[in-house]
Amino acid sequence: MEWLSAENVVAVATAILGIAASGVMLWFERRVPRRKRIGYRVQMDNPIGDDVRSGRANRRLGLFDETPGMTDATLVLLRVENDGSQGIGRDDYTGPEPHGLTAVFADRTIRGVSVTQPSGTGHLMDHFTAGRGFGYEGNTLRIPRVPLNRGDHFKLLVLLSGGDVGSDIRLFGGIRDGDVHPNRSATPDDTPPLFGRAARLITILLTVCVVTLAGLVVAQDGTPPPIGCESGTLTLTGSTAFAPVLREVARSYERDCAEAGAEIVVDAHGSTSGVRELAAAGAARAKGSPPVVALSDGPKPGGLPELRENRVAVSVFALVVNDAVRLPGDNLSTADVRRLYRGEITNWRRLGGPDLPVRLVSRDANSGTRQVFQRRVLGRGEIANSSLDCVHRDDPTAAVVRCELDSTEQVLGTVADVPGAIGYSELNLAGRADGVRRLDLDGDPPSVDAIEHGTSAYPYREIEYAYTYGRPPADSLASSFLTYLTRGNGQNITRTHGHIPCWTPTSLRLCTN
């Protein structure tokens, strides 16, 4: 991998962005919104008496039990802190009253207050005098204008009566260029958070950056290029049903082996035509194997011993009918299919369908899809062609209209357009076509999963072969591409197109039958 590759540039940029964003966020958290801030938190709110709701049951001794008014008493510990980035002086409190802050305890009455402070801040106690506004009345506590350096705090232990544990406690007041806000309570019974808010945000942001980097690594290196990428040109010919797989695998190979500069062309004209084209190219070559691979739906014709086979996948095919042809259960028996293709059934009413004439839309004689259909389903060849447009009978003596087309796509399009039409196609292409319905055979659906797991006897399927003229050299593009197709990344592409790759533990059995 080169250091200046696009993936590395993106990865480094992502890492730099993560670090910069973390620093900016921390600066923003510490400097911008918290220049002068007083925070407060309730660190304890506990019942003393028995008549306090929302409190735990308790036992009392001494003054807590003997002093009048303790039956509904509560103790609150309120912490007031400077959690901003600047110190706060007496003049920074902006209220018109002598005191600086006001605490209100909803539904409760204040009975007494004690001020505590950490060691080293004893000077704060000098401010808690009645002359500077310190006092309480009813449910309101007045807190003096206490100067607080950054990080300083003091605590107020307040004895209250009436009301409930957990009822609202608010602290308010004016701070020049700042504010008063509640912080997360951390009572003695609370489990303190593992991370602060800033630490959590930094952790989340860095995690996102790491995951992004990992995704880039996986995308770049998780499916490594095939071993032995080769340069040159290669022509893939043969099956039109398998051509979509070949086109995608060819693009994938060229992308993974970009440095090799391979050029792969897909030129599919039918299985038989492709096999014969390969044989002709090999015979015309004085020495060695031509840069041609022919894909065939089923085994090659006889009399071509020079062609070497490679089993690639199991392809599943399907009978398709025009969407207007609704048959019971969307199913035909093999016997009925054979009667249809012998011209013995000319109207779909005979099979429980609509009153529409049967029109047979077939492939040309070079088609592997047609040969598989004849071999696996019909057990014989199809009847003669009787129509050029698949609608009108050019041969008046023919029992049914039958036409032949050059590709699977043409068959699907014609079946969708012609009422009463029936044809055949590779399964995945049939599943994506509009205006057609796939048929079951003898109650078995055309299901790749069922066939792969041995739970279906569906007959219209065949092994997909890749043929080369002799054995191409190990360092040739043809050999490298076949390895990529059958044992490399091409297996995943083959499966996504609805075929069963041969070189997997579950499909080896299917590819040897």
Image (cartoon, rainbow, N blue to C red):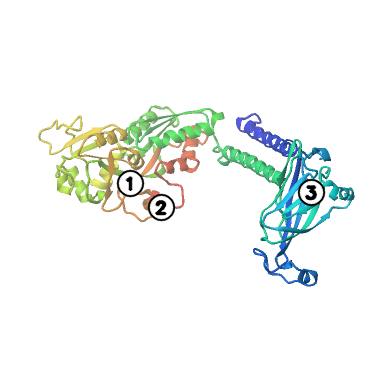
Label located before the other in sequence (3 or 1): 3
Mark closer to the observer (1, 2): 1
SS for tag 2? helix
Please indicate whether residue 159 sits to the left or right of residue 291 in the image.
right
Measured Cα–Cα span from mark 1 to mark 2: 14 Å
Disc 1 target residue: 461
Q: Quadrant of the N terminus?
A: top right
Q: Which of 10 and 315 is in front in this view?
A: 10
Q: Position of residue 88 (x, y in %)?
A: 81, 40
Please indicate whether residue 97 sits to the left or right of residue 16 in the image.
right
Measured Cα–Cα span from mark 3 to mark 2: 86 Å
In the image, what residue type sits under mark 1? Arg
Label located before the other in sequence (3 or 2): 3
Disc 3 target residue: 143
Disc 2 target residue: 509
Answer few, some or many: residues within 10 Å of disc 3's Cα (few below 14, many 20 plus, some between 14 and 19). many
Q: Nearer the viewer, residue 317 or 483?
A: 317
Residue in view at x 10 percent, y 33 percent: 396
